[in-house]
């Protein structure tokens, strides 16, 4: 069973994330120099309770958050962007408490406003931070290390106290704000507060190299704007989206230059992946690491007279752990595990994730066709470690459409799919172990994924059959019942422990199983509507 219908957090909907903007700057030598801006999704690894003590977002940021909130609550199906459906009460319950507090009309603390702008170099391995503050007569001056005159009380829509008063009796100093955001940024080149350079706010250098001190004498904000003229890693594939060209590369974690670059870039994942942690890619204790990068090419201005080289900016990456499995049956080989996948928000909904997953499977196939990897072993499987709901949806769509391609390519070996009509009960029998192993090996997916793609395939067959006007209502109901029982049996096997922990006995288990089936069916229909 997948979790693709779970509601995912949305950028800018916690108090801290509403205070923070992130921009990827375009190379100054490119035709288009407009920066791509977005807000974090998660801030809990930097700020406790996703709230910056004594600060609230700028008025503009609050208005933007309110607009997102209104679009949620006014939507008939409760959907906003990638967020799953639900009624308005469910949506309100799903909002982060710190965000819900911001929109409570009463008991708002009279605090200063804060806008933190993290401007990433095109390479994303360095940045500068620009901070704007606004104070009022009743708010403490942001440069003074003094407590707020009153304790800050945070109240949700329901009157629930969210943050302990004792925790909220002071305003966080800007030096502490910078210290905390530095946990999720590449090396910070400079700090600017209200357009004045304030490099004394830079934290001391850290062992992981994520913070560096720069020359504080310069008055130019862009003095450390780092551009790439060559992609990191070996090119795997280039493609276009609209008028932009992208390249996917594969880099070896054992390369010191790759490790240095990735150590600078990977803290950014903390803003977008809930459980993100740094990966020591030169470390081989668990296996060997490779990183798949996505870069955008930038053309020099057409007006330039020099032969300027194209520059690149980072759009995303996937970390890949290659694990030797010497005792795997029926033969030993390598398991490639997707551990961390990040595509920056400005590049969402453009098919980049699909392109990267396609490149990953093509890479695995090429390794086998060329006689295996450097270890002499074949890549047998590509799987995903603790995927987010959006990645589950992408993976299932990709696996299903690759399965369809295999069906069309090798109809003789896939003829077992045509043995029974949907009205025959045997149509709903689970795939045999022999066929499951064959599909798993050929597509390099887990056995669980083979069952998922078969369930989606059978749903497609049923939906196509239902288009026949000669089918009577009773027969359609019987076919749908058989499909429901088949999928529920699969879910029960997968989530037996969770069912056993249900406190409401068999009736509660029945309700829970029904909910899981409804979520799975909705997810499968979305896969069928996707283009793969």
Image (cartoon, rainbow, N blue to C red):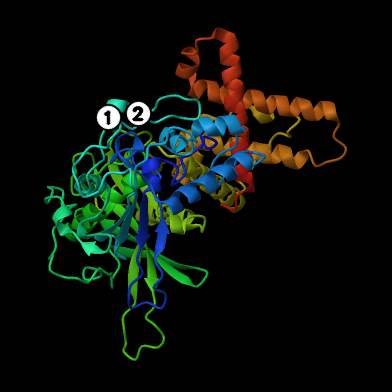
Mark 2 neighbour density, 10 Å: few (under 14) some (14–19) many (20 or more): some
Q: CA distance from mark 1 to mark 2?
A: 7 Å
Residue at coordinates 57% horizontally, 52% vertically from top-left? 405
Q: Would you say residue 156 is visible in this rendering?
A: yes
Residue for badge 1:
167
Q: Is residue 344 above or below residue 226?
A: above
Which picture quadrant has residue 388? top left
Q: Would you say residue 370 is visible in this rendering?
A: no
Which picture quadrant has residue 222? bottom left
Residue at coordinates 19% horizontally, 53% vertically from top-left? 254
Outermost residue, bottom direction? 305
Residue for badge 2:
163
Confirm or deny contact between disc 1 and disc 2 (CB under 8 A): yes
Position in image of residue 89 (x %, y %) = 58, 30
Task: For mark 2, give the secondary structure.
Answer: loop
Relative horizontal placement of residue 504, taking residue 46 as reference (left or right)? right
Relative horizontal placement of residue 147, taking residue 299 as reference (left or right)? left
Q: Nearer the viewer, residue 214 or 433?
A: 214
């Amino acid at each position: 069973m997948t979790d693709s219908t779970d509601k995912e957090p949305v950028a800018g909907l916690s108090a801290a994330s509403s205070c923070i903007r992130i921009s990827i700057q375009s190379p100054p030598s490119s035709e288009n120099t407009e920066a791509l801006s977005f807000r974090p999704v998660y801030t809990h690894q930097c700020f406790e309770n996703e709230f910056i003590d004594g600060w609230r977002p700028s008025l503009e940021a609050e208005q933007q958050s309110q607009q997102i909130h209104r679009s949620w609550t006014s939507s008939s199906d409760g959907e906003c962007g990638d967020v799953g459906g639900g009624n308005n009460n469910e949506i309100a319950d799903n909002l982060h408490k710190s965000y819900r507090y911001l929109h409570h009309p009463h008991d708002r603390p009279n605090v200063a406003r804060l806008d933190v702008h993290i401007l990433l170099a095109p390479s994303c391995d360095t940045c500068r931070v620009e901070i704007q503050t606004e104070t009022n007569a009743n708010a403490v001056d942001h440069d003074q290390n003094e407590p707020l005159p009153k304790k800050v009380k945070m109240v949700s829509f329901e009157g629930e106290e969210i943050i302990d008063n004792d925790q909220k009796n002071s305003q966080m100093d800007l030096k502490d704000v910078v210290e905390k955001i530095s946990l999720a940024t590449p090396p910070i080149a400079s700090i600017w507060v209200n357009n004045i350079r304030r490099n004394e706010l830079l934290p001391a250098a850290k062992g992981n190299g994520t913070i560096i001190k720069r020359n504080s004498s310069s008055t130019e904000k862009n003095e450390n704007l780092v551009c790439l003229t060559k992609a990191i890693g070996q090119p795997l594939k280039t493609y276009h989206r609209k008028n932009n060209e992208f390249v996917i590369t594969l880099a070896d974690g054992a390369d010191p230059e790759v490790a240095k670059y990735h150590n600078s870039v990977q803290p950014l994942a903390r803003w977008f992946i809930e459980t993100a942690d740094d990966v020591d890619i030169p470390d081989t204790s668990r296996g060997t690491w490779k990183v798949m990068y996505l870069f955008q090419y930038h053309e020099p201005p057409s007006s330039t007279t020099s032969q300027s080289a194209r520059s690149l900016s980072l759009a995303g990456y996937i970390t890949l752990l290659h694990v030797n499995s010497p005792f795997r049956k029926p033969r030993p080989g390598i398991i490639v595990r997707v551990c961390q996948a990040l595509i920056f928000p400005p590049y969402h909904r453009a098919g980049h994730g699909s392109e990267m997953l396609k490149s990953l499977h093509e890479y695995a196939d090429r390794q086998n066709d060329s006689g295996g990897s450097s270890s002499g072993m074949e890549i047998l499987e590509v799987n995903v470690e603790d995927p987010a709901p959006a990645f589950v949806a992408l993976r299932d769509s990709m696996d299903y459409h690759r399965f369809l391609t295999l069906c069309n390519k090798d109809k003789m070996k896939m003829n077992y799919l045509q043995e029974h009509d949907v009205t025959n009960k045997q149509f709903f029998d689970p795939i045999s172990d022999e066929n499951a192993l064959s599909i798993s090996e050929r597509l390099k997916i887990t056995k669980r994924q083979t069952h998922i793609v078969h369930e989606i395939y059978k749903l497609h067959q049923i939906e196509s059959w239902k288009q026949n006007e000669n089918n009577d209502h009773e027969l359609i109901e019987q076919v749908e019942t058989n499909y429901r029982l088949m999928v529920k049996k699969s879910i029960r096997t997968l989530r037996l422990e969770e069912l056993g922990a249900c406190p409401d006995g068999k009736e509660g288990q029945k309700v829970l199983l029904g909910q899981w089936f409804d979520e799975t069916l909705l997810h499968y229909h979305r896969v069928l509507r996707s283009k793969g």
